[in-house]
Amino acid sequence: MKIEETELEAEVMTEEEKRELRRQRRKKNQLMARISVIIVLLIFVAVGILSVALLKDVLFSQKKQEEIVFIEEESGEDFSSDLEEAVNTPLEEEPVFDEKQVLDEVVEAVISEMTLEEKVAGVFLVRPEDITGVDVAVQAGEGTKTALEQYPVSGLIYFAQNIKSADQFKEMLGNTVSYSKYPLFLAVDEEGGEVARLAKSLNLDNVGPMKKIGESGDPARAKEAMASVGTYLKDHGVNLNFAPVADILDEEEKGSFQSRSFGKDAALVSNMVTASLEGLKETGIIGCVKHFPGMGDGTEDTHEQMTVIDKTKEELYQKELLPFAAAIQSGAEMIMVGHASYPQITGDNTPASLSKEIITDILRAEMEYNGVVITDALNMGAIVEYYGADEAAINALKAGADLLLMPEDFSLAYKGVLEAVREGTISEERIDDCLKRIFRIKYRDSVGS
């Protein structure tokens, strides 16, 4: 009936009235087109593998609502329920941006494009001299560029001999980064006290020995000290610090870590270690906790010779492993395995750094650590007196290590690992596994992890 009445009225309308009616209908159609936008949501689109665009909801102004009322009054039609339904219909929930998944995709994409030679080079962290062949590296030029093209190692470690001035050191590291195809770890040992490469070489404020900080009983002092260290490391281009020391002193304090350890109490050392990691992290420096599974009871210096610690696994869990467990709980990204021997666990004098029982069984499986495992320097006496450079490197990888630090002969170690992979002694998947852990640290900031 209403339609018939409307049609009858239309017959007696003037031309002007007809135009007005058509104008109102056009306005209605335009408004309905705008309304349809509300029920369309375009979710984020990945551009390449690194960028994400998010589209937000579209809202109508009060003016549009007034137009709806006006059209309803003039046309005699009611479509407010359609509008209400469109507005109140829940929009499709935007998917959560999974940073871990994106990071894993980035890492896998990088690894998939690497040659086997590049992959093998990527499990080494060495001195600049090891790849350039110079006696002492104090600058990075064409020789460094060529060396990194041939051996794209995972990182470089610097000592006092490499540091002549602040400007020289910054320039050397800056140039080195620019020559590398992949992100680099640029590392130093900056524990504080007697082990402080930059502080001693550049006359910077030395935060002092960790034993003294431990004696204060205040973890905040450890955090403050490492934040100070991290600040000047970052300023000079370093991104990885081989600290803090998590070794616990024995009761007689006769071990080789007398001033480098926070103390004899496991709980105290645990708190100091986690606080130190926080201080480094706040300044953008990667901390490396050392020396797993704890060498405080070692009477010999592994730089010179083997040291044997005659403790069972149960005894280690009661004391030595506690700071490492705390570090893992707090998110430690890298742990260094020492060269002490634990015959009660391994059955022989195999150094921890080459032991599957220590790395894979205890650290990985039992303590559920999935960060990067790096060996202590493989040019130390505890290693070179018993193993060739290639043998040590291969054994460390087979034991579960991801990064091989400073083999005595890099060329021999590199060729040995490469040949082992080609022959199947070490699988390429094992090398990929190492690189995944390494690259998760290196590429995390690129996806906001």
Image (spheres, rainbow, N blue to C red):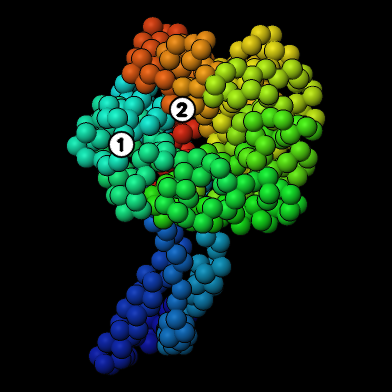
10 Å neighbourhood of mark 2: few (<14), some, or many (≥20)?
many
Report helix, strand or loop for mark 1. loop
Say above or below: 265 vs 20: above
Q: Mark 2 points at which residue?
A: 405
Number of the label disc, if any, that sits on residue 137? 1
Res 265 seen here = yes
- Asked whether, in this view, residue 27 is left or right of residue 379, the answer is left
Picture coordinates of residue 327, whole percent (x, y): 65, 40
Task: Return the x and y of residue 157 as percentages of the image width and height.
Answer: 41, 36
Q: Residue sitting at 52 percent across and 69 percent down? A: 87
Residue 187: give x, y in percent of width and height. 44, 40
Amino acid type for the residue under numbered disc 2 = Leu
Q: Which residue is drawn at 65% across and 41% down?
A: 259
Q: Residue sitting at 43 percent across and 15 percent down?
A: 389
In the rendered image, is residue 111 in sight?
Answer: no
Q: What label does residue 179 carry, if any?
A: none
